Image (cartoon, rainbow, N blue to C red):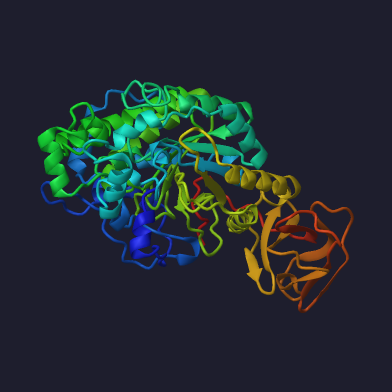
């Protein structure tokens, strides 16, 4: 991911408030029109949003203080697009925002999925220290430089590349992983195909730095793709690779020494792996062309149901390149007869400037849940433990904690993308497996309140008990999060006089037999609960008789304008 160390240093970013932009602005705004006047050779960062933003739905723009895009210009990016060797497949999608808007629709399979699995799976799990940003900090952070030197040797003698032979994945069993994912109740799986470190986890012909030729000598993505689909789950890939170009920024003395010795970062055999020795415009263009080629290879080899990008593609000056890959991917999907989608953060695919005007992409929030209901279609990527990549001392959240997060997200109309952290030997640690299996057991009982649902008129209440609401058809689900409340519970949101349409006719608890007795007055709906809890975490009441609001997803994924 791109922001976690920044968050530690500067604090989590804060949502601001902004009014909805008119839909026609999405088409009129092109990458050139939304860019500030460029100074020769200077990066063209997106200007900050100064208008108020809608905090309730998590509206945001491309806050350039935290992006990981290559520090370049629109001219360089347009030059890269001209060098792209691959031709666009025939189909309705052209590399323009207008074409994307006219032809894109959120995949129907995603609308009701509500729970997927993500993972940070890569070389950083070998040192298993601090985070998946190990490469950046072993060359740039004073304490990490010293720690690496103490445990593995000086950076000029043992660089990040030297972890590749140790990333052997000898215990990796794709079928066992896929069976675990199925039991967890997840509906789709998105492993890391490539992280910021530039190592490809698949059998690649467009980069030599890949898992088939080095390290495990296996097509890890290919094996997992086959196993996951055999379980009937959707399979996507995440690509953080565009962030590699300027990911490593060592101190001057380290750079000078390595340059003089032609060691590690300046080793001729590894210059294309690190992208440190040459950061000229020509080098950046070649890098961007290769980024495109790697995505094309992933698309053609694995036909991913979702192509997920991190913050590195956010900036507007990258729009011409993003539009090329979007048109390629969506036209390919038309040829396959599949519903697919790109997923991005902030305003990466929102040329009008904010994420309520996204075109051709499902919005992803990194570890942040909007505080209110956000209609449309969106997801939150959230980690199962204390770090995204595997670290030897990471803590792992309980199933009850993750279920609470899932319920909160779904009550606001979103989807949870839960990150896992596999080890360098190919094992998913036992603690993570236990949490996944317990989530699956809960969903076996309570999945009707999650899958295929949408938000109610309010997402929940936080009185004596934390309650979250979801809707499916004519049923309202009230999910009691936390400890078992005891003999009864009062739901104040269902009090008489609350402008509710219809009359409650029955209340049941998922996992328990028979109807529950209840009474309703001006203070709320009081429900007498079963004597024995049906599960070990959140408890779901199914309430019928009231008239429910309609589904709130949109074909574009954007919030419904009001």
Please provide percent x and percent y for residue 195.
38, 39
Please provide percent x and percent y for residue 150.
30, 45
Q: How many marks?
A: 0
Q: Say above or below: 356 vs 202.
A: below
- Identify the residue at image location x=85%, y=61%: 530
Q: Say above or below: 428 vs 448.
A: above
Q: Say above or below: 460 vs 128.
A: below
Q: Quarter-wise, where is residue 475 in the image?
A: bottom right
- Identify the residue at image location x=39%, y=53%: 346
Please provide percent x and percent y for residue 448.
73, 48
The front one of 19 and 515 is 515
Please provide percent x and percent y for residue 40.
10, 48
Relative side of 71 to 305, left or right: left
Q: Quarter-wise, where is residue 9 in the image?
A: bottom left
The front one of 316 and 199 is 199
- Identify the residue at image location x=39%, y=23%: 89
The front one of 26 and 414 is 414
The front one of 500 and 421 is 421
Relative side of 238 to 64, left or right: right
Q: Say above or below: 269 vs 494.
A: above
Q: Quarter-wise, where is residue 547 in the image?
A: bottom right
Relative side of 126 to 543, left or right: left
Residue located farthest toward the bottom when viewing the structure as drawn: 522
Residue 432 in sight here = yes
- Identify the residue at image location x=66%, y=54%: 550
Residue 92 in sight here = no
């Amino acid at each position: 991911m791109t922001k976690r160390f920044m968050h530690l240093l500067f604090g989590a970013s804060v949502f601001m408030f902004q009014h909805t932009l008119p839909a026609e602005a999405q088409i009129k705004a092109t990458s050139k029109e939304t860019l500030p006047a460029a100074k020769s050779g200077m990066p063209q960062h997106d200007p900050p949003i100064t208008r108020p933003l809608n905090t309730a739905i998590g509206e945001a723009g491309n806050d350039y203080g935290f992006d990981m895009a290559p520090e370049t210009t629109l001219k360089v990016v347009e030059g890269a697009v001209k060098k792209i060797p691959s031709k666009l497949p025939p189909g309705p999608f052209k590399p323009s925002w207008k074409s994307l808007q006219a032809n894109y629709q959120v995949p129907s399979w995603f609308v009701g999925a509500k729970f997927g699995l993500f993972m940070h799976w890569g070389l950083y799990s070998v040192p298993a220290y601090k985070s998946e940003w190990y490469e950046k900090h072993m060359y740039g952070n004073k304490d990490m430089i010293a720690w690496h030197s103490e445990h593995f040797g000086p950076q000029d003698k043992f660089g990040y590349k030297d972890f590749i032979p140790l990333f052997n994945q000898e215990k990796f069993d794709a079928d066992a992983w896929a069976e675990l994912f199925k039991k967890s109740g997840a509906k789709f799986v998105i492993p890391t195909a490539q992280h910021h470190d530039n190592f490809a986890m698949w059998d690649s012909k467009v980069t030599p730095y890949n898992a088939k030729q080095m390290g495990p000598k296996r097509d890890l993505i290919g094996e997992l793709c086959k196993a996951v689909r055999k379980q009937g789950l959707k399979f996507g890939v995440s690509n953080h690779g565009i962030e590699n170009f300027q990911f490593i920024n060592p101190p001057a003395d380290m750079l000078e020494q390595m340059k003089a010795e032609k060691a590690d970062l300046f080793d001729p055999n590894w210059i294309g792996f690190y992208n440190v020795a040459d950061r000229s415009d020509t080098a950046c263009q070649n890098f961007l062309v290769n980024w495109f080629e790697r995505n094309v290879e992933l698309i053609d080899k694995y036909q991913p149901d979702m192509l997920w990008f991190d913050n590195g593609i956010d900036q507007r000056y990258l729009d011409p390149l993003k539009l090329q890959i979007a048109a390629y991917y969506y036209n390919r999907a038309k040829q396959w007869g599949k519903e697919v989608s790109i997923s991005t953060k902030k305003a990466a695919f929102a040329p009008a400037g904010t994420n309520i005007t996204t075109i051709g992409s499902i919005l992803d929030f990194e570890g942040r849940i909007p505080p209110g209901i956000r209609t449309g279609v969106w997801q939150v990527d959230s980690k199962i433990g204390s770090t995204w990549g595997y670290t030897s001392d990471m803590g792992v959240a309980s199933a009850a904690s993750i279920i609470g997060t899932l319920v909160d997200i779904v009550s606001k109309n979103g989807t949870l993308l839960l990150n896992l952290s596999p080890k360098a030997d190919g094992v998913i640690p036992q603690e993570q497996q236990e949490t996944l299996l317990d989530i699956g057991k809960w969903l076996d009982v309570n999945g009707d309140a999650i899958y295929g649902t949408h938000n109610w008129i309010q997402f929940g209440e936080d009185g004596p008990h934390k309650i979250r609401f979801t809707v499916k058809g004519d049923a309202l689900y009230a999910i009691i999060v936390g400890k078992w409340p005891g003999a009864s519970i009062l739901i104040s949101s269902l009090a008489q006089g609350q402008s509710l349409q219809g009359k409650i006719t029955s209340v049941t608890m998922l996992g328990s037999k028979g109807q529950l007795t209840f009474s309703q007055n001006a203070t709320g709906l009081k429900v007498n609960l079963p004597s024995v809890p049906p599960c070990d975490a959140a408890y779901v009441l199914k309430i019928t008789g009231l008239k429910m609001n309609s589904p709130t997803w949109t074909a574009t994924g954007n919030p419904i304008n009001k």
